[in-house]
Amino acid sequence: MRRSLLVFLFWLPVAAWSGAAWSGEFESTLLVQTGKLRESDLIVRAIADLESNRVCLGFYIRTPGTSSSMACYDTDSGFRSRVDHVGYFQEGKLVIRKVRDHGNQITCLVAYASAPGTSPAIDCYKSSAKTNEPIRREDSLREGDLQVIRLGDPDSTRTCLVAFVKVGGAGPAMACYDSVPDGQGGIVQTSAMREGDLVVRKVVDQTNSKACLVSYVSTTGTTPTLQCSDQDAPVVMPVAKPRPPAMKRDWPQPPEPEPWPPAPPNMDPWPPVGEQ
């Protein structure tokens, strides 16, 4: 009996500590992965934020030294997402993929380079298109080691400029905007600047009236930045009107003098000098 009492007293603190460990606070998980898409070396994960009623798509590339990118948007049909790969374009190391969340009517263009250390550039926008028209390559520009490609998404009438440094570049930069119907022209470089290793180029999309500045460093592993804005209309200087010709005034002319009257007959008009 005494031995049993000693055993009971020995295990009492252990049982009390064990009960305290199991009676901790309840932890709720507010971030939940609702889906995953793998397309070649691109991984897309759909994440639901239950607290803010938003869905986020996380993009990353299965290469060493990569970085992720994320786009978030409000949900239209709950937290269920059905993400599919619906478009593809590749030129050299540059890869562009079109991903669509059918449940929330969101389309994302993802641009990356198939090289170590790349980071995807993404642009997501609302799109209710039911078709899957391919991405169109509309124009391109090569200036030095910089390549700029203009792509069109017919499903959503969007245009994207993708800038990529071909010599040792790690990742591209992308800027998207609404397309101008029946626009004309291409993409041209209008000016450039170089200070040390920094290079800045101004590229104009004449079709959509956009002016973009592209900056990058001429070193291995660089990723450019791309900023686009509406192109200002050219300033038209007013043309000076020519002065009207001087008016000619018709001043009255003096009357012509009357002729001298004729001399009388048989009369010398004036005697010669010295004969008076």
Image: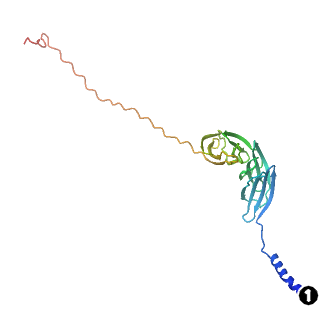
Q: Position of residue 185 (x, y in %)?
A: 64, 38
Residue at 21%, 18% (x, y): give it: 259
Instruction: Please state, as top left, top right, bottom left or bottom right, where the C terminus lies in the image.
Output: top left
- Tell me the quarter of the picture where residue 167 sits: top right
**Crowding near the residue tagged with mark 1, few <14, some 14–19, many ≥20 C-alpha atoms within 10 Å:** few
Q: Quadrant of residue 266?
A: top left
Compare residues 224 and 49 and report the one nearer the observer: 224
Which colour assignment does the render follow?
rainbow
- What residue would you read off at disc 1? 3
In screen coordinates, is 269 left or right of 197?
left
Q: Is residue 75 visible?
A: no
Front in this rendered view, residue 226 or 127? 226
Question: Disc 1 on helix, strand or loop?
Answer: helix
The amino acid at mark 1 is Arg
Taking the spot 70% from the left edge, 40% from the top edge, the residue there is: 138
Taking the spot 86% from the left edge, 83% from the top edge, the residue there is 10
Q: Position of residue 128 (x, y in %)?
A: 74, 52
Residue 246, x across and y down, in percent: 37, 32
Return the x and y of residue 3 as percentages of the image width and height: 91, 87
Q: How many marks?
A: 1
Which residue in the rendered view is the most extreme toward the left? 276
Report the front residue among 213 and 73.
213
